[in-house]
Image (cartoon, rainbow, N blue to C red):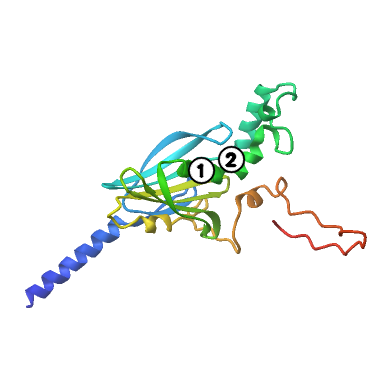
Amino acid sequence: MNWIGVIVASFVLLSSSAAAQEYSEYISKEDGFRVTFPGQPTISTTTYKSEYGADLPARVYTVVRSPDRYSITVVDYRNIQKIADERASKACPSGKGDERSCGLVNAGRGYWKEELGGAMLHSLYTFIARDVKITHLAWAWQDLIEGYEVQMTNNADQSRTFAYISMHKNRLYIIEGTAPGNYPPPALFQQSMGYVDEEGRGVRYQSVYSNLYGEWPKDFPALPRRTGQGGGGAAAAPATAP
């Protein structure tokens, strides 16, 4: 028997098994996502401060594999209209007052429309505001759901962070992986985002999904039909989605 061959083959199998166990798909039916984590994440709850100061419930899924760190923060915006309305009611109970506080003009009471429309951009801003050099910034999609990709280098220790920000079913997802500058970047983690329904089944759309138009079609409708321009009265153009 070729014992050397057996030993080598066993070593390869064990190594492959360990690697497979290290990186695996993690599914959260409760928060509606799937992502490739290098280990089993720990889960913590926190409060996320929105752009206009609303306190929103959030969960953070974290894997620390020193010196790397991986996390996904899920922020629940599903009650933002109610929360913003209650805050505006306290700020101006009569419905009159400072427009900034009441948020009544073209925005939905309490600026809830701004909160939803700007949620991803507000999250992106928190990355840009760090002491970092942005090396990549782009609109993108994963699993046909739109989002922002951002890559940066920390000015203090030269570590690299790869992040992806998206929104689905009124939940904000913030993926963030950080590794030392001389280590492979956490690109696999950044690119592994997916979405699931209440049963844990993968969600798939026929075209790129936007949270505003997917979840709020009455409040964010398609552009109105044009009735022509100038004195000539041109024929109306077909209505198109934004």
Q: Please name whichever residue, 40 or 150, is drawn nearer the observer in this view of the structure.
A: 150
Mark 1, residue position: 125
**Which residue in the rendered view is the most extreme toward the bottom?**
1
Distance from the alpha carbon under mark 2 to that under mark 1: 22 Å
Position of residue 73 measured from the top left corner of the image (x, y, whole percent): 45, 43
**Which of the labelled discs sits on residue 78, or is there none?**
2
Q: Secondary structure at mark 2?
A: loop
Position of residue 117 measured from the top left corner of the image (x, y, whole percent): 62, 45
Amino acid at dot 2 = Arg
The answer to whether 201 appears left or right of 38 in the picture is: right
Q: Mark 2 and 1 residues: CB-CB less than 8 Å, in contact?
A: no
Above or below — where is 114 with respect to 20?
Answer: above
Position of residue 134 measured from the top left corner of the image (x, y, whole percent): 44, 50
Q: Nearer the viewer, mark 2 or mark 1?
A: 1
Above or below — where is 139 with respect to 156?
Answer: below
Quadrant of the image occupied by residue 96? top right
Q: Residues within 10 Å of mark 1 (few under 14, many from 20)?
A: few
Work out whether mark 2 precedes mark 1 in sequence or the reverse, and give the earlier one: 2
Position of residue 144 measured from the top left corner of the image (x, y, whole percent): 55, 60
The answer to whether 36 appears left or right of 119 in the picture is: left
Q: Please name whichever residue, 87 or 226, is drawn nearer the observer in this view of the structure.
A: 226
Residue at 49 percent of width and 57 percent of height:
201
Amino acid at dot 1 = Tyr
Residue at 75 percent of width and 21 percent of height:
94
Quarter containing the C terminus: bottom right
Quarter containing the N terminus: bottom left
Q: Secondary structure at mark 1?
A: helix
The answer to whether 215 appears left or right of 180 in the picture is: right
